[in-house]
Image: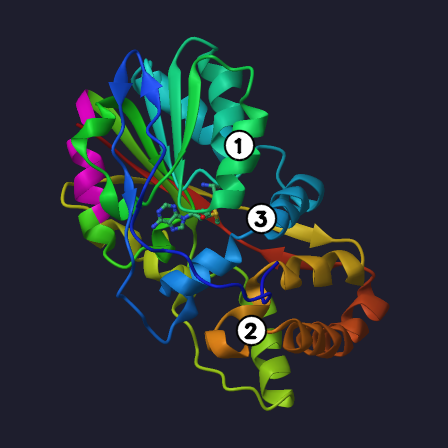
Amino acid sequence: MLGQRKPCDFSAQPTIHPTEAGQRYGVVHQRSHYMNNDPFFDHKFVHESYQTQDDLAIRILSHQRYSLQTENIFDAMTRHALTITHPQRILDIGAGTGAWYQRIRRYAGDHCFYLAIDQSRAMVKQLEDNLLHDTQALVRRGSAENLNDELGSFDWIGLHFMLYHVADIRDVLSRALKLLRPSGLLLCATNGSNSYEEMMARHQQAARTLGLPYQPSHGIDRFSLKSGSRFFPVPVHKVEVPAGLLFPSIDSYLSYYGSGFCWQGIPSDSHTPEIKEQLIKTMAELVRPHFEERGALKLSNTSGYFWTQK
Ligand SMILES: C[S@@+](CC[C@H](N)C(=O)[O-])C[C@H]1O[C@@H](n2cnc3c(N)ncnc32)[C@H](O)[C@@H]1O
């Protein structure tokens, strides 16, 4: 869980090399020397945040339950990608719990090969369990920073809702582009920069009320629909998908807030279970009048994706 600190083991260690059609993959994990005050791309923080899949699962479930739109961004993006090129091999970098995988199987069918990579042991374990019976899918632990051509080449490569965690975004995108086959598609879903403004304003107030050190975080804005295009070494298209969440109860809102947003702008050494509890309690007091007056709370979170064809 976020805030439960465990020794960081980002040390260099080879991945258990999987084979696909006899080919071995050589992704390795390296000790990160890149530390920054902004927890959003502090490797230690990213490592901690995704130590279990609980928080990501809360966010995905909240989007399923409370989304104001009927169409999910992964549905729209995958269907669009199929109008451009049909894939045989797909690489999903920072795959998490496999939100894209489900749409790939739904729209692109069972025959294309799917390779997921994630730096988190927990995500890899969860995805491995989910994909156990899919003979055309593999999951490996590895980091986006170490992509190399031993992985082979791909028709679709996705880096969804993860580039804002990467220190050198341009380098990772260049590496991904090299792995694309001719006519292949690079797809990068992310949030709009105005996402979660309402929640972030109250979060800042909660942090100040508790006297916590708070530095406005670039967070998601590091790679948003507004800022993202400048990181691509090639021209890209952008598709915006307006989105929003309607939380029906204070508990649903607090659960979403506690799934990671509560740490934005707060240095990693304050990420303890006690501080998280205080932040959630303080947030509850700040947001309660809204729920009492209006019964529900709307949170805007525009999302979308960049795409480019090789
Ligand atoms: C917000 S989740 C998104 C997961 C999934 N792509 C989705 O859209 O549902 C970010 C994921 O990226 C992974 N991640 C973060 N930085 C990474 C890196 N440098 N290399 C590989 N995976 C990374 C995290 O472990 C986490 O699973």
* Residue 223 against residue 65 in the figure, above or below: below
Disc 2 residue crowd, few under 14, some 14–19, many 20+, Cα 10 Å: some
* Residue 191 against residue 15 in the figure, above or below: below
> Cα distance, mark 1 to mark 3?
13 Å
Task: Tell me how many marks there are.
Answer: 3
Mark before the other along the chain sequence, 2 or 1: 1
The N terminus lies in which quarter of the figure? bottom right
**Disc 1 vs disc 3: which is toward the camera?**
1
Tell me if the residue at label 3 has its CB under 8 Å from ligand 1. yes
Q: Which residue is mark 2?
A: 271
Mark before the other along the chain sequence, 3 or 2: 3
Choose between 159 and 273: the one closer to the eye. 273
Q: Which residue is mark 3?
A: 56
The C terminus lies in which quarter of the figure? top left
- Say which amino acid is labelled 2: His
- Residue at image position (56%, 15%) is 133
